[in-house]
Amino acid sequence: MNCTVGQVAKIARVTVRTLHHYDEIGLLHPSGRLGSGYRAYSIADLERLQCILCYRQLGFSLDQIKPALDDPDADPLELLRRQHALLTKRMGELRRMMTTVETLMEARTMGINLEPHEFLEVFGDTNPVAHDKEAEQRWGGSSTWDEARRRTSAYTKDDWKRMQAEFGALMANIAAAQAAGAEPGNERVMALAEKHRGYLERWFYPCTYEMHRGLGDLYIDDVRFAKQLAKFTTTGADLAGYLRDAIYANAERNAHVR
């Protein structure tokens, strides 16, 4: 089967001008013949065009593509394997980019109004809104939820950095207490649990002891929270459960407080 330049342009979704250019620079010559004697593109030419377009999508220049395809020792199957590997890598990069964009979209919806470069600078590959949909289902429409959204929508990049640093230092202290063998009901550990409650009140919303207990339960009920908190310990201990128990102990000693 031989195809005219117009037919190939339509099949490959390129312009006739592009095909003429490839012909002029020796990258892709039509090697077939029509019944009228005019040159046309053969199946082999179409396969070569597919390789050219694939490499172009991967960012290769025409000067890089030509020697790769013209190498007499090149194995056609190996070329396909190389393209497959490059496409697989590109797909992975695109998936990561899509995840980042989706996270940014969700963050904007949830009140984190940072520019993309600021968001990545603050959070890196951590998703700060990974649990917000569940939280919205649980508390959405409440005054607590509204207050948290009001505050977070006004935070700057530096605010978020300070918040992250404060939380990291707090969790490191809690993990250190656990590693030292301190019981969750220890005065020092309960004081850290109180600091955790204060952190929430200062940055997000008024947090009663009852609400704090509910959050502690969420830390162990949802494995994603446990995984996040596990990043702060090097011992492999159950930091989420330890924090939950400390929260409960602290709430119990403050039972008289509303």
Image (cartoon, rainbow, N blue to C red):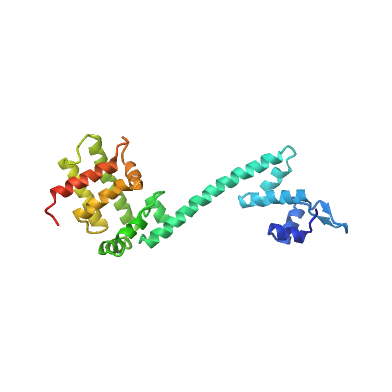
Query: How far across and how far down the image is residue 163, in percent?
Result: 29, 52
Query: How far across and how far down the image is residue 57, in percent?
Result: 62, 52
Between 61 and 257, the one nearer to me in the picture: 257
Query: How far across and how far down the image is residue 91, in percent?
Result: 55, 49
At 64% from the left edge and 51% from the top edge, which residue is drawn?
Answer: 56
Horizontal side of residue 98 vs 33, given as left or right: left
At 34% from the left edge and 59% from the top edge, which residue is drawn?
Answer: 137
Between 247 and 38, the one nearer to me in the picture: 247
Horizontal side of residue 203 vs 191, given as left or right: right
Tell how many labels.
Answer: 0
Query: How far across and how far down the image is residue 103, in percent?
Result: 42, 55
Q: Quadrant of residue 238?
A: top left
Residue 17 visible in this rendered orientation of the protein: no
Horizontal side of residue 22 vs 88, given as left or right: right
Q: Given the current orientation, which residue lies at the most extreme right position? A: 36
At 21% from the left edge and 49% from the top edge, which residue is drawn?
Answer: 195
Between 220 and 180, the one nearer to me in the picture: 220
Q: Quadrant of residue 38?
A: bottom right
Between 155 and 81, the one nearer to me in the picture: 81
Q: Given the current orientation, which residue lies at the most extreme left position? A: 256
Query: Where 10 falls versus 230 (above or below)?
Result: below
Q: State the quadrant of the C terminus.
A: bottom left
Residue 10 visible in this rendered orientation of the protein: yes
